[in-house]
Amino acid sequence: MKNIGLVILLLLLGSCVGEVKEKLTKAKAGVSNASTFVKEARKVEGRIEKLKNAVPLTNEQLKEWLPQNLGPLERTGFKVGQAGMYQVNSVEGTYKKAEDKKTLSVMIIDGAGPTGSMMATSYGLLGNFEMETEDEYKHQQTVEINGIKAQQIYKKKSNDTQLMFAYEDRFLVTINANDMLPEETWGMVDELKLEQLTKMTE
């Protein structure tokens, strides 16, 4: 349910995008961050309209796509429709490496439809602003790996990695990896073969 709560927060953020853009448009042109946000907000409007009218994949299609294995990790469980109360379709899979502490959970939400389009654009904004912060406990930064812009959080003491991004401006992806460095976690993203989801929408 932690991931679902995060989705609610992002939905609320998305619903405010239009209002924020309007206010920022009136701000002084010399503020670079405001200018960046205005540009992104304009792009968001187009994405929302496109996704709003798109037909989402069914929960059954998402379940059929979910891989049985991610490299050495085996799927130990799955859930579909957990985000259904928010009028979006979703699938969540959990993976584990036998006789190892490595575990990974992945949640995919299809951003098509009226509600999903707001969520997808909010997720998309996460990767569009350069940021980085670090302390003794964690390192959080905006990264771009293999063309995917994401928010990446690495917890140093527990060796845990979290990735959040919108794939092809539509599929909301949240990955939580335990006992994995960021590089290894991105390797699991490759194993997901997210491009197959895009092909299923054609």
Image (spheres, rainbow, N blue to C red):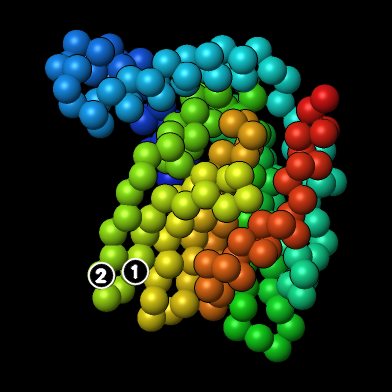
Extreme residue in the bottom direction:
99
- Provide residue 40's location: percent of width, then percent of height: 41, 24
What residue do we see at 69% from left, 18% from top?
54
In this picture, is 129 found above or below 103? above
Determine whether the residue tagged by mark 1 lies in a helix, strand or loop.
strand
What residue do we see at 47% from left, 20% from top?
44
Numbered badge on residue 135: 2
Would residue 158 appear left or right of 134 to someone viewing this image? right
Query: Identity of the amino acid at label 2?
Result: Asp
In this picture, is 13 found above or below 82? above
In this picture, is 163 found above or below 35? below
Numbered badge on residue 127: none
Query: Identity of the amino acid at label 1?
Result: Lys
- Provide residue 137's location: percent of width, then percent of height: 30, 73
Count of marks placed on residues: 2
What residue do we see at 52% from left, 49% from top?
144
Binning the other alpha carbons within 10 Å of mark 1 as few (below 14), some (14 to 19) or many (20 upward) gives some
* Mark 1 in CB contact with mark 2 (< 8 angstroms): yes
Q: Which quadrant of the view contains residue 199?
A: top right
Numbered badge on residue 138: 1
What residue do we see at 80% from left, 65% from top?
69
Which one is in front, 50 or 57?
Answer: 50
**Do we see residue 143 in this rendering?**
yes
Determine whether the residue tagged by mark 2 lies in a helix, strand or loop.
loop
